[in-house]
Image (tube, rainbow, N blue to C red):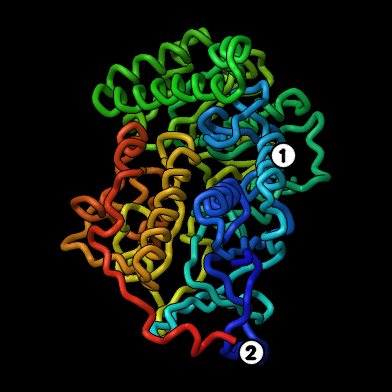
């Protein structure tokens, strides 16, 4: 069977044209989407497929974010694909190199011809009669497919989270959000305030500090930070004596054991981990009082995602005097800057609102079954991959405590196993059943950006296969062997394909 699309009878409701049909449609050409396509071609080479990408370029997150210093927040030996080793020198890599890596992977895998750029899916409706999805695209065109695999991440590309700051319109300087960084923004010799304390903020501050007059990180509360070297010594040594793939496996295994071990330690011995992280900060800043004022969170380690600062760059610019941290609340904006609850006026020429993301599931697609809308938040998460009661639809979400790609690749391989099982037994439809109970949220973090969107995402159940354990070492052993038939209802096509095919 050719991988190109084919037409099936059935009119496009808005244009009257024949709808192009694929076996599988992958939504998103970022890190996950390209990985999914690679696995699909590798394991099911006869399937027709298309990747629908709303933007005009490959890369997803790594094409969208262009703010100063944008980089990976985990090591590249675990963030990269297991089937294509990371050959870069850096362990913590800049955004443009990650983007190029994804582009090269797509080119090497022959995936580029399957990508439809500038193609945004706005709605998807499942037909129980025909056992297929009809996708409505921005502009009114449609296409159909047997299976939808959403690899669009979990945040909105259209808007970041921006609190309603009092008096913002009175500010005489420039306000920017990192998600939409102006190419012509100049902050040379200017006073910059970065609002936030998460991964974006701790990246921006050391990147902007050398050129700005001064950079202040304004935070309501501190975040846990950990220092990692920008290069991996073990990887460098392994590359000298081993082939690239073997060296990558060594570095990958070492980093997996270290990061997963540290996460488990944090959950089991939070007091000890707090002491370790504080010791790192005190050693770097040489000021215990400053650390306790600005780097002592009130929550436990890994209740929110731990932020990485490569080579301690944030601590370095603070010690140099080019940057500082203020822990306070915003009362209002004024022409000259930001008035704080303490009464202090924090002067600024440029304010960067690194205040977080707006989370949405499956790229914001409005999905329905026979015209009835699917309320995603009312469904349970089957293995963190599918939705209870929703046929032939999978989505990809990575780990919150480790590199995204580690879980993404396990999800890709599971989806391919499910499709293989369906083909082998002549099934057209796979629908996860409904669990007896629903438990905690799918994204189990206390971070504000997660808490604001809990009702938009499915919830976990209280037993397998409805639980999502944030444990790669466990998942890598169990997911490849997971029973694809458990709590899953299969059925064959109710209408012979020859009756609807052109």
> Which residue lies at the image location 56% right of the left edge and 89% below the top edge?
10
**Left or right of 211 on screen, residue 460:** left
> Which residue lies at the image location 40% right of the left edge and 51% below the top edge?
414
- Disc 1 crowd rating (10 Å Cα; few below 14, some 14-19, many 20+) is some
Q: Identify the residue under disc 2.
A: 14
Asked whether residue 199 is in view, the answer is no
Q: Which of marks 2 and 1 precedes in the sequence?
A: 2
Which corner quadrant of the image does residue 173 belong to? top right
Residue 359 location (% of width, % of height): 48, 55
> Which residue lies at the image location 56% right of the left edge and 26% below the top edge?
325
Q: Identify the residue under disc 1.
A: 100
How far separated are the C-alphas under marks 1 and 2?
Answer: 38 Å
Question: Judging from the image, what secondary structure is the residue with disc 1 in?
Answer: helix
Residue 431 location (% of width, % of height): 32, 69
> Which residue lies at the image location 48% right of the left edge and 17% below the top edge?
290
Is 134 drawn above or below residue 417 in the view shown?
below
Mark 1 near mark 2, Cβ–Cβ under 8 Å?
Answer: no
């Amino acid at each position: 069977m050719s991988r190109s699309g084919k037409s099936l009878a059935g009119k496009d409701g808005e244009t009257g044209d024949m709808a192009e049909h694929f076996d599988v449609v992958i939504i998103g050409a970022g890190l996950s989407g390209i990985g999914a396509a690679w696995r699909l071609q590798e394991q099911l080479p006869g399937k027709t497929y298309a990747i629908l990408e709303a933007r005009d370029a490959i890369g997803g997150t790594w094409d969208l974010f262009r703010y100063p210093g944008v980089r990976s927040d985990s090591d590249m030996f675990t963030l990269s694909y297991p089937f294509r080793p990371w050959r870069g020198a850096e362990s913590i890599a800049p955004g443009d190199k990650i983007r190029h890596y994804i582009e090269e992977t797509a080119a090497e895998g022959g995936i580029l011809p399957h990508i439809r750029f500038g193609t945004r899916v706005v709605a998807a409706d499942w037909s129980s009669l025909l056992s297929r999805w009809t996708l409505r695209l921005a502009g009114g065109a449609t296409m159909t497919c047997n299976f939808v695999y959403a690899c669009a991440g979990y945040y909105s590309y259209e808007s970041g989270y921006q609190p309603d700051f009092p008096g913002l319109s009175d500010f005489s300087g420039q306000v920017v959000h990192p998600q939409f960084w102006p190419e012509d923004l100049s902050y040379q010799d200017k006073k910059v305030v970065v609002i936030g304390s998460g991964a974006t903020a701790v990246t921006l501050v050391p990147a902007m500090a050398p050129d700005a007059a001064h950079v202040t990180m304004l935070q309501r509360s501190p975040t846990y930070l950990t220092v990692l070297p920008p290069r991996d010594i073990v990887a460098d040594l392994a590359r000298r004596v081993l082939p690239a793939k073997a060296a990558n496996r060594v570095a990958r295994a070492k980093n997996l054991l270290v990061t997963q071990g540290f996460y488990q330690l944090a959950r089991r011995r939070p007091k000890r981990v707090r002491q370790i992280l504080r010791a790192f900060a005190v050693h770097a800043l040489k000021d215990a009082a400053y650390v306790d004022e600005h780097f002592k969170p009130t929550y436990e380690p890994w209740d929110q995602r731990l932020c990485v600062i490569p080579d301690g760059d944030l601590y370095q610019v603070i010690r140099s005097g080019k940057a500082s941290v203020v822990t306070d609340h915003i009362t209002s904006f004024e022409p000259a800057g930001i008035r704080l609850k303490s009464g202090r006026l924090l002067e600024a020429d440029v304010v960067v609102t690194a205040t977080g993301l707006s989370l949405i599931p499956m790229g914001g697609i409005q999905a329905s079954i026979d015209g009835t809308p699917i309320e995603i938040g009312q469904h349970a998460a089957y293995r963190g991959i599918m939705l209870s009661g929703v046929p032939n639809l999978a989505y990809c979400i990575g780990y919150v405590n480790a590199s995204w790609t580690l879980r993404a690749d396990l999800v890709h391989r599971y989806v391919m196993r499910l499709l293989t099982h369906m083909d082998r037994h002549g099934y057209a439809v796979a629908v996860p059943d409904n669990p007896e109970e629903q438990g905690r949220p799918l994204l189990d973090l206390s971070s504000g950006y997660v808490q604001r969107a809990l009702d938009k995402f499915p919830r976990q159940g209280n037993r397998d296969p409805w639980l999502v354990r944030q444990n790669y070492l466990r998942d890598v052993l169990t997911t490849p062997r997971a029973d694809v038939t458990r709590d899953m209802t299969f059925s064959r096509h109710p209408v012979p394909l020859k009756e609807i095919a052109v």
